[in-house]
């Protein structure tokens, strides 16, 4: 059970990082908005420390989204990787060409 919770915490941290990068915000900007050090923010984003519920709501506000969106996890992994609109459509995240998967 501990492994499953750690995986979920990592998924939340990844959601935060992905949205931060999408918006073009730096870790320094986020840390400043939260009034914490960059190192403390980095540790939260890498799931090395727990994110308090208060910080989760503050992060969601900075990222202009609902906290529930940050903690939502996919129900299951797809058999074929989803196409990420922010990456080249000719490649999936493993670097394989999509036609090699089909």
Image (cartoon, rainbow, N blue to C red):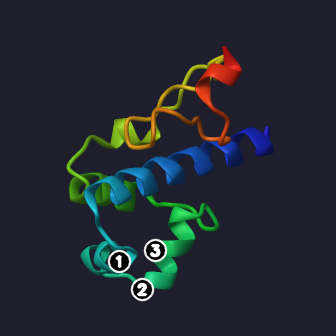
Q: Residue 25's x, y, as percent?
A: 29, 67
Measured Cα–Cα span from mark 3 to mark 2: 6 Å
Q: Residues within 10 Å of mark 3 (few under 14, many from 20)?
A: many
Q: Residue 45's x, y, as percent?
A: 51, 63
Q: Secondary structure at mark 1?
A: helix
Measured Cα–Cα span from mark 3 to mark 1: 6 Å
Q: Residue 12's x, y, as percent?
A: 51, 47
Q: Which residue lies at the image location 38% right of the left edge and 43% below the top edge?
A: 86
Q: Secondary structure at mark 2?
A: loop
Q: Secondary structure at mark 3?
A: helix
Q: Which mark is residue 37?
A: 2
- Mark closest to the chain's N terminus, 2 or 1: 1
Measured Cα–Cα span from mark 2 to mark 1: 6 Å
Please give left or right for residue 3 compared with residue 12 in the image: right
Q: How many marks?
A: 3
Q: Nearer the viewer, residue 97 or 50?
A: 97
The vertical placement of 55 against 33, above or below, is above
The vertical placement of 54 against 102, above or below, is below
């Amino acid at each position: 059970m501990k492994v499953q919770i750690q995986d979920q915490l990592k998924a939340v941290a990844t959601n935060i990082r992905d949205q931060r990068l999408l918006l073009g915000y730096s870790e320094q900007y986020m840390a400043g908005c939260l009034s914490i050090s960059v190192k403390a923010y980095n540790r939260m984003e890498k799931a090395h420390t727990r994110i308090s519920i208060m910080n989760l709501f503050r992060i969601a506000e900075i990222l202009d989204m609902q906290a529930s969106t940050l903690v939502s996890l996919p129900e299951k992994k797809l058999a074929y990787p989803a196409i990420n609109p922010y990456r080249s459509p000719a490649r999936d995240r493993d670097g394989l060409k999509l036609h090699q998967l089909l």
